[in-house]
């Protein structure tokens, strides 16, 4: 009798596991319908948010199979600063659209660990001195720097934003970087109707 009940419990647990796994898979494929729809291009930062003299390149889509092809739709734009004695600044902004927020959150967890975004130097994860800014509207946020520049990966619902910039010349100061990140947040807040989160998490270090 006890053995029979034990087998029944095992069968029930197995069926429950299958159902739960199916539910998890469904959350990855069910599309999220946003009304009104949002054009990915409208979420890209403009050159007016960057230091004076910086110029924007062409907006382009990420080809399938590329190393930074993560979303169902991806657009990117590059920026270049004027040459100086210290070299030349550069930055890029990339926006990924995913099928739904759950899938975006899962991929965000993988992206923030990828060296392609934060480099391979031993001091990555550092922040500029007295750095305080953290997006008030992002659901997930990762900001880190290495010896040559800084990068941010942020998730907003079903979108993931990646912004990376060099910090090797006087033009891109921490204040200028903060201004660019605030401009990205403002653009996304306007288009997605995002409100500040109640208790934003701290910048991971």
Image (cartoon, rainbow, N blue to C red):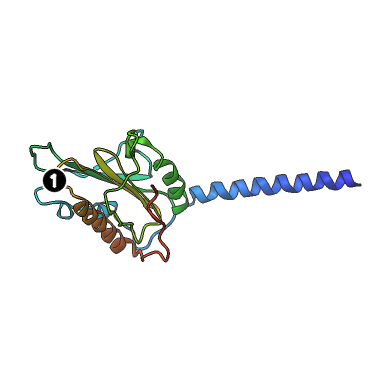
Q: Residue 80: image x %, image y %? A: 15, 42
30, 176: nearer the viewer = 176
Which quarter of the figure has residue 151? top left
Mark 1, other Cα within 10 Å: few <14 / some 14–19 / many ≥20? few
Q: Is residue 31 visible?
A: no
Kindly state the secondary structure of the residue where label 1 is placed.
loop
Q: Residue 135: image x %, image y %? A: 33, 58
Residue at image coords 89%, 46%: 2
186, 65: nearer the viewer = 186
Side of 141 where 5 appears, left or right = right
Disc count in the image?
Answer: 1
151, 86: nearer the viewer = 86
Q: Residue 200: image x %, image y %? A: 40, 60
Which quarter of the figure has residue 86? top left
Instruction: Name, please, the residue furthest toward the front.
Output: 129
Residue at image coords 37%, 63%: 35
187, 182: nearer the viewer = 182
Q: Is residue 135 visible?
A: yes
Using the image, determine if residue 26 lies above or below residue 190. Answer: above
Using the image, determine if residue 70 lies above or below residue 157. Answer: above
Q: Residue 48: image x %, image y %? A: 15, 55
Side of 4 where 61 appears, left or right = left
Side of 7 where 89 appears, left or right = left
Q: Which residue is mark 1?
A: 170
């Amino acid at each position: 009798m006890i053995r029979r009940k034990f087998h029944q419990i095992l069968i029930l647990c197995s069926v429950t596991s299958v159902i739960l796994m199916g539910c998890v898979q469904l959350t990855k494929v069910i599309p999220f319908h946003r009304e009104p729809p949002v054009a990915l291009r409208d979420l890209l930062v403009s050159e007016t948010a960057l230091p004076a003299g910086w110029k924007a390149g062409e907006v382009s889509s990420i080809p399938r199979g590329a190393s930074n092809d993560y979303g169902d739709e991806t657009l990117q734009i590059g920026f270049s600063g004027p040459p100086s004695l210290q070299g030349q600044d550069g930055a890029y902004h990339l926006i990924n659209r995913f099928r739904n927020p759950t899938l975006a959150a899962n991929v965000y967890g993988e992206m923030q660990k990828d060296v392609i975004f934060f480099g391979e130097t031993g001091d990555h994860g550092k922040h500029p001195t007295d750095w305080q800014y953290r997006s008030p509207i992002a659901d997930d946020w990762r900001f880190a720097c290495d010896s040559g520049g800084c990068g941010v990966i942020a998730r907003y619902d079903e979108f993931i934003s990646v912004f990376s910039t060099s910090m090797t010349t006087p033009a891109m100061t921490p204040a200028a970087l903060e201004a660019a990140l605030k401009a990205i947040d403002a653009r996304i807040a306007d288009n997605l109707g995002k409100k500040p989160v109640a208790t934003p998490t701290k910048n991971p270090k």
